[in-house]
Amino acid sequence: MATASLTLISKPGCHLCDDAREVVTRVMTEVSARPEAPDVTLDEVSILDDAQLHDRYAEEIPVLLINGRVHNYWRIDPTRLTTALLELA
């Protein structure tokens, strides 16, 4: 079975991060209901806890990585994320 490791880079008190988390969680739920879906996991990391992430992404959060590669930042498009996840299957 294919896998997709999602990493949401965010920080506390960020309204765009809250929006992104909701989109990612909703898409994960919808995708997981499909028989062809990859096994998807989500890890959230705060830029306040990692100096390297802060230096790299401070002006772009939230940032969503799929398997370690930047998928999107600022606003997460649910259709684009769904498509990307299903292409991994």
Image (cartoon, rainbow, N blue to C red):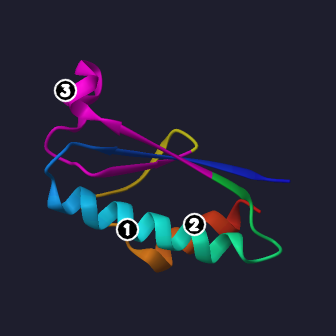
Q: Could you tell me the amino acid type at mark 2?
A: Met
Q: Say which residue label 2 marks.
A: 28
Q: Quadrant of the C terminus?
A: bottom right
Residue 19 position in % (x across, y down)? 27, 67
Determine the residue positioned at 24% across, 33% down.
47
Task: Specify which label sits upstream in the sequence, 3 or 2.
Answer: 2
Q: Say which residue label 1 marks.
A: 22
Q: How many marks?
A: 3
Magenta run includes residue 61? yes
Q: Could one spot residue 83 in this view of the protein?
A: no
Q: Say which residue label 3 marks.
A: 55
Is label 3 in a helix, a strand or a loop?
Answer: helix
Q: Bounds of the magenta span?
A: 41-66
Q: Quadrant of residue 50?
A: top left
Is label 1 in a helix, a strand or a loop?
Answer: helix
Determine the CA span between mark 3 and mark 2: 28 Å
* Left or right: where 60 falls relative to 25: left
Determine the CA span between mark 2 and mark 1: 10 Å
Residue 65 position in % (x across, y down)? 46, 47
Q: Quadrant of residue 78?
A: bottom left
* Left or right: where 45 falls relative to 18: right
Is label 2 in a helix, a strand or a loop?
Answer: helix
Task: Specify which label sits upstream in the sequence, 3 or 1.
Answer: 1
